[in-house]
Image (cartoon, rainbow, N blue to C red):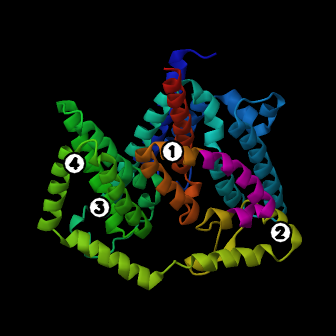
Amino acid sequence: MTSPALDLWRPSALALAVAIYGTFSQPAPSGLGPAEVLIAALLVAAIGPRHGFAFATGLLLRAPSPYRLETTGAVTFVLLLWVPLVRGAGLGWEADDILRDVVPLGFLFLPALLLRPLEAQRHVAAAVLAAGLAVAGVAFTVRWWADAQWGFGAVGVRAMGDGLSYWLNSPTVLFAALGLPFAGFAAWSRRTVTGALIGVVCAVAAALCIAALAGAVHRVALVFVALAFAAFVICWLRREPVLLAVMLLAVGAVVLAVPGPVLGTVEQVIAKSRLVGANARPAEVMAVFEQVTRSPLALLVGDGWGALVANPAVGQWRVSYTHSFFSYMLLKTGFLGCFAMAAYLSHLMASAVALARRPAWAVAVLPPVFIGLALHTSFKFLCFGLLLTLMVLLEGAVESDRESRQKA
């Protein structure tokens, strides 16, 4: 048993790590600096060194675990760590490329690693981690705006670049854009001065994130923003009709007064879709498939961590990444690794389904998870693993709430 103070320290360390990540690091840092070392130390503190070592080495499996996610995760992690690692080393891949694959593998297993340490404070951990992720998303957005020289007037007029650091590819940006309006309106509905101030801060932060996504013309993210707006209206229509009507009138007045950014963004989304279509994503999958089908062994276990592919999505450059999780896993780990990862992801899918009981959380969490798995390389980011962790914590919070109501 751990003390309550230690139980609270773990989620606090986790939230501090992700806040530092958003403020002083990058979505995919190029190396280890002071910020990255501090983030790593906080993650180790949140997980617990002994627990992390037992998980990574498979020693955790010596005793039965009460958590199926933890058991499946430990088995899958050991398999996916060593088989592709030996395969990649045997094929002579660069050590830096191997390391750039192995470290993100650990991020993907953060839900299984953190489940037991955070179990005692699921509700607190979920709330604190969500706040940390939102702070990171807003911080990444502010840093993108700084790189763009605060060019708000360009939104809807011209497509703005993603920048060398790809700030907006972080799942935390879309998480903040989708989740903060719900949090802000919930604070407004309390009808207190503090609630009003929190609501204003959330609204401004969400507007910054949405405007940044519009400025860089992130098409799928903007579609999810539009769908989230519809879900927002449906969610609050019966609970706070008057307050919702006031808010919608205010938003409508702003759009009518300055229609250019909204209409221009819609036109840019349509134009970009006509110009680039699916951004060569199908061709990318075919390139991976052609590479791994050259031999039965490559098809079974892939080309290992550190493997490169001539990627059509980036002009046939030989790179170590692809833009979908499936093609990435197929390239590195083959069908064996894909099946193992599918077993692990099946437990996470149960958490995603459980979020249907909390629509506001589902709207905030599931779209960035979908984009990370299907369209971006963000499945390799620390924040993606933490978003998956939040999803698992929320599932437990939903279940405990339901059990409490049944007992009452």
The answer for how far apart the CA atoms under marks 4 and 2 are is: 56 Å
Disc 4 marks a residue whose amino acid type is: Leu
From where the camera sits, is residue 280 visible? yes
Q: Nearer the viewer, mark 4 or mark 2?
A: 4
Which x, y percent locates residue 92? 80, 64
- Label 1, on which residue? 355
Which x, y percent locates residue 173? 40, 54
Q: Nearer the viewer, residue 282 or 26?
A: 282
Disc 1 marks a residue whose amino acid type is: Leu
* Circle number at residue 244: 4
Relative to 54, 229 lies left or right: left
Q: Nearer the viewer, mark 1 or mark 3?
A: 1
Helix, strand or loop at label 4? It is: helix
**Chain part drawn in magenta:** 329-350
Residue drawn where x is 81% and y is 27% of the image: 63
Relative to 150, 26 lies left or right: right
Q: Nearer the viewer, mark 3 or mark 4?
A: 4
- Give the residue furthest to the right: 296
Helix, strand or loop at label 1? It is: helix
Q: Earlier in the sequence, mark 1 or mark 3?
A: 3
- Give the residue furthest to the bottom: 275
- Label 2, on which residue? 298
- Label 3, on which residue? 211
- Using a 10 Å C-alpha cutoff, classify the residue at mark 3 as few (fewer than 14 neighbours), some (14 to 19) or many (20 or more): many
- Using a 10 Å C-alpha cutoff, classify the residue at mark 1 as few (fewer than 14 neighbours), some (14 to 19) or many (20 or more): many
From where the camera sits, is residue 28 visible? no
Which x, y percent locates residue 96? 67, 58
Relative to 359, 302 lies left or right: right
The answer for how far apart the CA atoms under marks 1 and 2 are is: 38 Å
